[in-house]
Amino acid sequence: MTQITSQINLDGAYAIITGANRGIGKQISETFQAAGAHVFACTRELNSDFMDWVETQKQSGTGDVTPIQLDLTDDQSLKSAINDIRMVSSKIDILVNSAGVAHGSLFQMTPISDIKTVFDVNFFGQIALSQSVSRLMARNKSGSIINISSSTAHIVDPGTLAYGTSKAALNRATKSMAIELGEMGIRVNAISPGVTNTEMSAQMDDNARSMLIASSVLKKAASPQDIANTAIFLASDLSSHITGQIICVDGGIV
Ligand SMILES: NC(=O)c1ccc[n+]([C@@H]2O[C@H](COP(=O)([O-])OP(=O)(O)OC[C@H]3O[C@@H](n4cnc5c(N)ncnc54)[C@H](OP(=O)(O)O)[C@@H]3O)[C@@H](O)[C@H]2O)c1
């Protein structure tokens, strides 16, 4: 897989990335740091595995990494995370909302409480963090917010009510945010991945995963680096005229 970091430089940029301890968020963190960014790597738990990864990254990349504890469902954790970030830099250039939870169950069998739990992370948590961070970005009249959505927002399979609607809401919010924040110099876009090889997709129903992959033109799952390559483009000035867009990185589900 070709990495795009040799063409895109994020030197001096400060980037907040949620879900940085694994999967897509981790790959985006490594990619941005390799391109020179100072990454605020957000995780629910600052455990030894994560801190070992931070130390390895600090030694290998050209940028820097600051670990941040953040549980998106906890208002106090969100406030503390913003304070911790501001102790290092109140200038924030990039926010990647990658943290998310999957959920599968049929419509009639899905408790409302489950739908609320999914929305708490995939929608309300992302919105609350984006509100706080966009206020910091507005001071510099510059910023790029990237929401990690999902093809499930527009491809409707049985059993995807909670997850799919949370991502559809995020797509709609991406456009609302882009319209309101554009005059503050802040661009807002979403990436809509199809099946991507992470722990989340490994937990999908085998049949559903195979059918989704088979429905794509390229007939293969994405790697986390495929998503990170699009994220770094949207984070950089190469995409300076792109906002309010949902970019599908799904192997061509047409
Ligand atoms: N993989 C796919 O096939 C696929 C396809 C389309 C879209 N996506 C989207 O891509 C994003 C990344 O997915 P992934 O595949 O990398 O998933 P993943 O490997 O399951 O990682 C999910 C991340 O979200 C974090 N998270 C969950 N609940 C959180 C909370 N309350 N507060 C803060 N962080 C929380 C997890 O932290 P913990 O480790 O602490 O749980 C983890 O870091 C998600 O938004 C997902 O919906 C994935």
Image: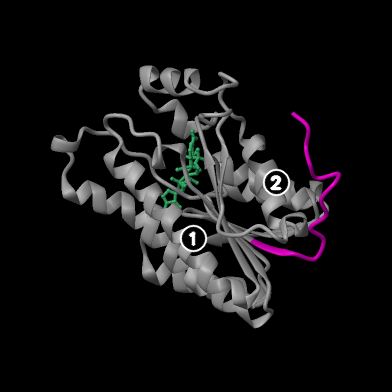
Frontmost of labels 1 and 2 is 1
The stretch in magenta equals: 1-15
Front residue of 247/203: it is 247
Category of crowding for the residue at label 2, using alpha-carbon neighbours closer than 10 angstroms: few (below 14), some (14–19), many (at least 20): many
Can residue 7 be spotted in the picture?
A: yes
Where residue 122 appears, x then y in whole percent?
40, 52
What residue is shown at x 80% (from left), y 51% (from top)? Answer: 35
- Residue 124 to residue 76: above or below: above
Q: Which mark is residue 175?
A: 1
Where residue 28 appears, x then y in whole percent?
65, 46
Q: Distance between the residues labelled 1 and 2?
A: 27 Å
The quarter holding residue 137 reads: bottom right
> As drawn, is 130 to the left or to the right of 207?
right
List the residue tagged with mark 2.
Answer: 30
> As drawn, is 9 to the left or to the right of 106?
right
Q: Is mark 2 within 8 Å of ligand 1?
A: no
Q: Which mark is residue 25?
A: none
Can residue 53 be spotted in the picture?
A: no
Q: Residue furthest front?
A: 254
In magenta stretch: residue 233: no
Amino acid at circle 2: Glu
What residue is shown at x 85% (from left), y 46% (from top)? Answer: 7
> As drawn, is 170 to the left or to the right of 216?
left
What residue is shown at x 33% (from left), y 47% (from top)? Answer: 165
Where residue 118 appears, x then y in whole percent?
32, 49
Category of crowding for the residue at label 1, using alpha-carbon neighbours closer than 10 angstroms: few (below 14), some (14–19), many (at least 20): some
In this figure, which colouring scheme has been used for the structure?
one colour
